[in-house]
Image: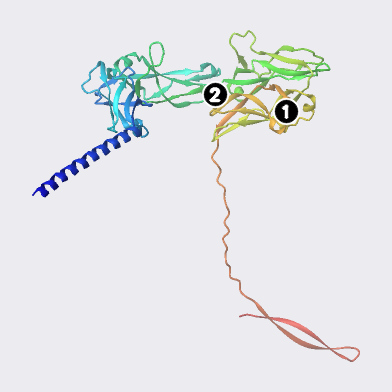
Amino acid sequence: MKKKGFSRYKWREDLGTALLALALALVVWVNATYQADKPREDAFPQPIPIEVLNAPSGLTVTNNPANSVRVVIKAFSSSWASLTPSSFRATADWKGLSEGVHRVPIKVTCSDRSVTIISVQPESVYVQLERVVKEAFEVSVNIEDKDALPLGYTIEPPEVEPRFVSVEGAASAVARVKALVVSVSLLGQRTAVERMVEPRPVDEDGATVTNVKLSPQSVRVRFDIQKKLNYREVAVRARTKGNPARGYYVSSVSVEPATITVFGPPATIAAMPGLVSVKGEIDITGATRMVVQRMELDLPEGVSVYREGESDPQRVLVTVEIDAVKGGTTIELPLQVKKLQEGLVAKLSIPSVDVILTGPAVLLDDLQTSMLEAYVDVGGLGVGVHQVKTAVDILVSRNPKLGDLVVTSISPEYVEVDIREAPPPTPTLTPTLTPTVTQTPEVSATLTITATMTPTLTGKRTVVPTPSLTPKSE
């Protein structure tokens, strides 16, 4: 019996020793793990976006509350490496809020439960809510660049579709809206204009009102530009005769105004070219300085010039600049059309322009027309008759030294460009060869030779074969 009792006590002592050893081992392991992966308290480096919950309907925010928060957390080193902004959720519950200003607390949670949120900045946000209202406004049209439309053209009242647009937003913002305005430019336009434009809500001072929503967001604006039959815009050109004094050259020829509006009988106006000249030529023989002369326009009978505030509108001021020779030349270049819209064709009133260049004489002596390019840029222009400014490019890519040349004058400065819609392509007829079989009767011939005896004076007999053809039908 003693032996059995001793064994029972021995077993208990061994179990206690084992449990004590296990506990000590666990403490050592926990301590080692803690030392290897110590928790760290620090600010999370990225902001956490705020998610609004239970936003009340019929209300809108009129201030700018914070849309993100910064947090300070405590987490194990192993967790820091895996944390991203999506690991956190910051929420602001607007349930039960009414019109006015409210302080809403921010609640932040983390998907990693081992992470402790120490602090949140800001802890709450102030939200100002206002009632949402909707009001309809009639759209008004503001026509820009009215002065860009030449005399002789009239603008019909614009058409807007739809005429009324709804403005929705906070009551205070909608109350500031006094009008909806669309702006349309007339620059380069000579015919009807139709565009989709976004209206702009403005207050009584013309400033744009923000934080409102328009429905629809854009409207169609259309207005007609009508040309009076007895008016026309034309360019003016002046020419010189003679040569300046030795060692001088003509550096530029300019006309003021460069374009004019003429009026007269509709048939005469329609037959006029897009360019008029002055009567005669300016004599610059022996000139050593600028020559300025007021010259009369060479106009058809019955045609006059319309210019407000001018006592003598039939005359223009021509200025010929004379400079000392550094090197100058006048060259005639063919005129090209650039940036013409697809589906349109353009016709120029003149095929070429006179270009005056200055620069080193050695370059001017070898200058060729292929090194220069004269053109009119019709980009953005629609169907109609336009006065377009001429331009010249020096093709430096073909000879870098050409960069020393300078275009000092282009005459005329403007040319008339008649832009029209391209005619539809003409269909091309393609002949088709169809073979026809005609039966022809076959004819064969049989050759029959007949011998005829002809006597001769020598007494000899000569046999002359006479062939005959006998047709044979099959």
Query: Residue 349 falls in which quadrant of the image?
Result: top right
In the rendered view of the protein, which quadrant contains the C terminus?
Answer: bottom right
Q: Let me know if residue 132 appears in the view.
A: yes
- Mark closer to the chain start, 1 or 2: 2
Query: Residue 63 falls in which quadrant of the image?
Result: top left
Please tell me the numbered disc located at residue 402: 1
Residue for point 62% across, 75% down? 442
Q: What is the residue that sits farthest to the right in this orientation?
A: 458
Asked if residue 289 lies left or right of residue 102, the reply is: right
Q: Residues within 10 Å of mark 1 (few under 14, many from 20)?
A: some
Q: Of helix, strand and loop, which one carries label 1?
A: helix
Q: Where in the figure is residue 103, as x and y percent of width and height?
A: 26, 17
Q: Residues within 10 Å of mark 2 (few under 14, many from 20)?
A: some
Please tell me the numbered disc located at residue 154: none
Q: Of helix, strand and loop, which one carries label 2?
A: loop
Q: Where in the figure is residue 310, as x and y percent of width and height?
A: 62, 9
Query: Residue 351 falls in which quadrant of the image?
Result: top right
Q: Where in the figure is residue 96, as x and y percent of width and height?
A: 20, 21
Residue for point 72% across, 12% down? 293
The residue at which mark 2 appears reads as 188
Q: What is the residue that sits farthest to the front in this orientation?
A: 2
